[in-house]
Image (cartoon, rainbow, N blue to C red):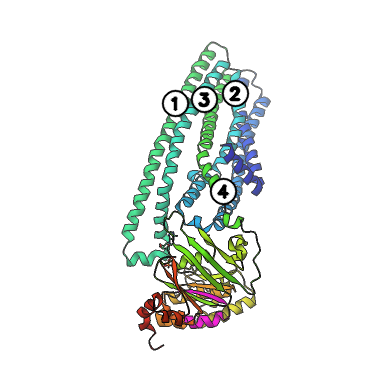
Amino acid sequence: MIKGLTFFLKFSWKNKKSYVVLNILNQMVQGIMPLIIIAMPKFIIDELLNQQRIEMLACYIVLLLIATFIKNWVGSHIELQIFNKRCYLSCAFSEFIHNKLLNTNYSNLETPDFHEIKEKANKFLYGDWHGFSFILENAFSIAGKMITLIGIVAIIFTMNIWLVCAFAVLMVISTVIDYKLKQKAHGLSLEAVNIERRWNYFTRILEDSSYSKEIRMNQIGDWLINEEKEYAHKAIGFYEKRNKYFSKSALFNTLFVILQSLMTYCYLIKDVIDGNISLGSFSMYVSAITAFSASVKDIITSIVDIKVYGVYYEALEKYINIKDTMRENARLTLPQMEDFLIEFKNVSFKYPGQNTFALKAINATIQKGKKISIVGENGSGKTTFIKLLCRLYDPTEGEILLNGINIKDIDYDEYMKVFAAVFQDYKLFSFSVKENIIWKDNSADSREKTAELLNDIGLGERINSLPKGMDTSVYKEFDSSGFEPSGGESQKIAITRAIAKDAQIIILDEPLSALDPRAENEMFVQFDNIVKQKTAIYISHRLSSCRLCDEILVFKQGEICEHGTHEELLARNREYQKLYSLQAKYYIGD
Ligand code: ADP
């Protein structure tokens, strides 16, 4: 509990000091003003029943009105300010979480456990849908309520010390019961995380227009909606069960309040009848006890909430402490790249949580300026090889060396600059065409270079014909006159992006699959001309590109079963020859 609060407090103080200060101010207002509002009616009634001095009555009423004004208007003004600051703080938290996502080992993003911890961490940050920093503000409110409570207890002490003790005992019993019930309720919330993640997934794909073609053509809309409903109902089932505990907790709280009121009224009525206290005091004590019950109830609720959210904080702590090992251990600067050699030495790799090796004892070299083609059947390990080369994963066994240095030791971001890749599942963003290629760079030189590259790749005319040329939005998400590229056009934009990065090694992982074999072949020739002296690695099902390459690596069941030039491999008459002859009909006449 304390750890979670300290974390929040430190974070808030670091990112938005005014948020902490305003909360403290708010609690002072909310803590002190009710005491004046409780006490004043006693003075007014006593004055009315005794001396009836107009100036004193006016004084009490003005004081009462000022306190009411400060509590209500100033209080709500401060709360609105807190809301504004909370939004900034929430933004800072998003940034923090997103940075974590950007920097965490890529392998984490492919493990469900990571996503589950992230969801649970969010539950702590957003108080289980109560809104951001629910926990911290609860803690602040305890401080405010404590101020009121101390004042009220001082008032009640003048009435009867034993009554205060009885109330304290009731408070302790009520807290224990409340804590137990809410702990069970939040346990259910944690169990629901897995279901909620699936529910959110169905909601997301139903709302994401990039899935709509698949959904319509496969007529799976009804099925998806049903799945969404089913998971939603399962989650709601958890909420219903959870709310039963909340309801029980509310019942116990109410019973305690009733019991307290009953004890108070019996005691006070007897005191008034016996002439021990005035009507003014009667009114003050009744208000004090009512406020006492409300404050105690709020304090209990807040303490219990903060305490049970400790479970969620554990998830947040786990999430924050996930080590970004790939970056942390990589300290060497990138070696000189004028001439380079990348070597795979006995590299084997298993995906996390898998029993079988996706790559086995791979030995290969990539030399500067070479064009390498990687071929092999589906699932033979081609993409995995590229993922290891690009350090999305580290080998399970063996090592990958760049000019003799293990790539694990080279600064991660610098190493990333070596590669430009177009993966099979490349993505275009709903930004302008230009931003999809050179991002935020808007210099005249870069725009000119982009226009040249688009021309080289055969997309220049098409882009120039768009309403705003290369500044036209891709897709129609933010602009109804946006550009909806065809499969081939999208791939060309993605390839232009890779070329524009000006990296040492360009990787094309089956990016031309949207083209027919002949167009693909032409595209490869064109691409080869554009990349010129650069090192290039192509993965393609279709082997037409291989003839242009210096070396071909043939993958089979996670191993390199052959390597050599196109002619050498054909002459060898083994795996490559078999794959090639299967497709030869496409190339006849080339
Ligand atoms: P290719 O690119 O040759 O089609 P991959 O390298 O994608 O093959 O896959 C090689 C093997 O690794 C396949 O058996 C595939 O199912 C498995 N694999 C690929 N990606 C993952 C992953 N993220 N987690 C677990 N297994 C994977």
Q: Which residues are magenta?
A: 523-540
Q: Disc 1 marks which amino acid?
A: Leu
Closest to the camera, between mark 4 and mark 1, is 4
At 66% from the left edge and 63% from the top edge, which residue is drawn?
A: 333
**Residue at the spot of label 3:** 172
Residue topped by disc 1: 255
| Residue 514 place in picture, x, y as percent | 41, 75
From the image, which quarter does the N terminus lie in?
top right
Residue, disc 4: 320
Q: Amino acid at mark 3?
A: Val
State the SS at label 3. helix
Q: Nearer the viewer, mark 2 or mark 4?
A: 4
Task: Give the left or right position of residue 81, taking residue 230 as reference.
Answer: right
Closer-to-camera residue (492/224)? 492
First-in-chain label (4 vs 3): 3
Name the mark nearer the viewer: 4 or 3. Answer: 4
Tell me the amino acid under the disc marked 4: Ile
Q: What amino acid is labelled 2 in the image?
A: Val
Q: What is the distance, in whole Å, between disc 4 and disc 1 at their CAs?
A: 42 Å
Q: Earlier in the sequence, mark 3 or mark 2?
A: 2
- In the image, which is nearer the foreground, mark 3 or mark 2? 3
The correct choice, above or below, for 521 with respect to 210 in the image is below
Disc 2 marks which residue?
A: 153
- Please tell me which of labels 4 and 1 falls first in the chain: 1
Image quadrant of ligand 1 equals bottom left
Quick one: SS at disc 1? helix
Nearer-the-camera pick, 151 or 455: 455
Label tally: 4
